[in-house]
Amino acid sequence: MRTCRGVRESLKMSNKKVDVLLVGAGVMSATLGKLLAQLDPSLKIMMVERLSKVANESSHGLNNAGTGHAGYCELNYTPQAADGSVNIKRALEINAAYEVSLQFWSYLVDQGLLPTPEKFINPVYHQSFVRGEANVDFLRKRYEALHKHHLFEEMEFSDDPAVLRDWMPLVMQGRDGKEPVAATQVKHGTDVDFGFLTRKLVKALLKLPNFELKLNNTITGLKQHDDGRWHVRVKDTHDDKTRTVEAGFVFLGAGGGALPLLQKSGIPEAKGYGGFPVSGQWLICHDPKIVRQHTTKVYGKAAVGAPPMSVPHLDARILGGESVLLFGPFASITTKFLKEGSIFDLFGSLKSGNFKPMLSVARDNLPLMRYLIGEALKSHKDRVDALRDFFGNARENGWELASAGQRVQIIKNCDTKGGKLEFGTEIVTAQDGTLATLLGASPGASTSVQAMIEVIERCFKARMKSAEWQSKMREMIPSYGASLDDDVPLLHAVRKRTLETLRLERESRA
């Protein structure tokens, strides 16, 4: 069947006029739609998704790490300089951004627009674990730099094996105690089922009279007319008919599929952007005897030259109500931009404006290419051997392989090298504010609220200056307009509220 329970789909899409068109039914589009609907319930919003389900690509539970990325455990957000110092700027930015997401989700829970918190977010200790003298020294310096900042004041550090056996018993199994080890932990870390969260956000939107969801619909073209409005061609894969939607604002929230759509738009701001697709796989364990032994998220150090999505971590996850353990992800080379995409996606994205940067990145990142090919050729035994760095007693028959999501890293022009590979995210907007997209992957869903607020600030400038919208923003996000990085009392007040509302203290769920 084309339709599903609770989904209203119009049969007459020709010349359909909307204020906002959201392309892709993932967490970014759902978040932007919910923010805009709260700011102005009269806005006519349409969401178009090429698949038959909401949140079935990048936002699907298995297609992302599920870590509420706050910089607590992700060592790649705190690079070490040649002089040994640790740069914490990125970790501070990500932590403050995640607090914005927590505030918005708390507001929606308070308003009854999201279900009870444990359905989509759960408290999980965030831990980092390293081995060897050099890595222990790095982790100590990282802790010392972060701990003195109020955003990370609750972080703990230990290099005592006895303490670590208490923190992470599964990870410490089978270690002889001779090798230097160290770990940090933050107790109010989170595990988030972004697929469930996205579906509930969309379900809440579907209750509004001015919102429509179109599943099984693919964007085949988009063009801006002289009046500034976009005419978007949408093909319904059910009846194979192409119709037109006229929109005042278009958001391309299609994950890896955003870049090709951005190129179709023809806006000057799209010139020079390319994409470097990376796929991934997990080892997953369902055995309750093993799962019960590990209740935290433990992140290690990535291999030199590895993309951020392949930072190794052993994760306690709750997916569809089931407690499981995931290890990985194991990155691999691909030419697809989406998990359910085409092997020709990469080649189709090559344009005259981005050919030079794409070629330059391919030339300058041969070690990364070799790494990805090596990851792809790993056997099950090789993957379990990698797992044993975290769980020394792991057995091959206790773990099975599962596909993770596709990610498209950003490639852009660079004056010195011709092209540069970026591992973060970037918002691209048309000069007139009528179109926006989000490119890149990390930290992705965790900072979706902050990212979508930035989209609104860029593309709805006049309305965002109004007293009405400013007031509503502060109602939804109490820290809006202030800096959690600078304001210690505000951070404490905000964090106290979100931890209580979302029940993120483990004791509150005992």
Image: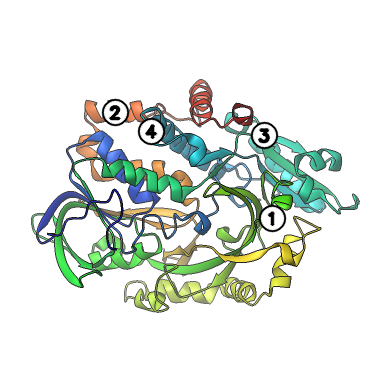
> How would you rate the neighbour count of disc 3 (Cα within 10 Å): few for under 14, some for 14-19, many for 20 or more?
many
The picture quadrant where one finds residue 41 is top left
> How would you rate the neighbour count of disc 2 (Cα within 10 Å): few for under 14, some for 14-19, many for 20 or more?
some
The picture quadrant where one finds residue 396 is bottom right
Q: Which residue is mark 3?
A: 155
Relative vertical location of residue 19 with respect to residue 346 in this rendering, above or below: above
Q: Earlier in the sequence, mark 3 or mark 1?
A: 3
Residue 413 seen in the current view: yes
Which one is in front, 118 or 467?
A: 118
Which quadrant: the C terminus?
top right
Q: Which residue is mark 1?
A: 287
> How would you rate the neighbour count of disc 4 (Cα within 10 Å): few for under 14, some for 14-19, many for 20 or more?
some
- Label annotation for residue 108: 4
Which one is in front, 288 or 335?
A: 288
Which quadrant: the N terminus?
bottom left
Query: Do the residues bearing badges 1 and 4 touch, measured as CB atoms within 8 Å?
Result: no
Q: Which structural element holds mark 2? A: helix
Query: In the figure, is residue 209 to the left or right of 110?
Result: left
Q: Earlier in the sequence, mark 3 or mark 4?
A: 4
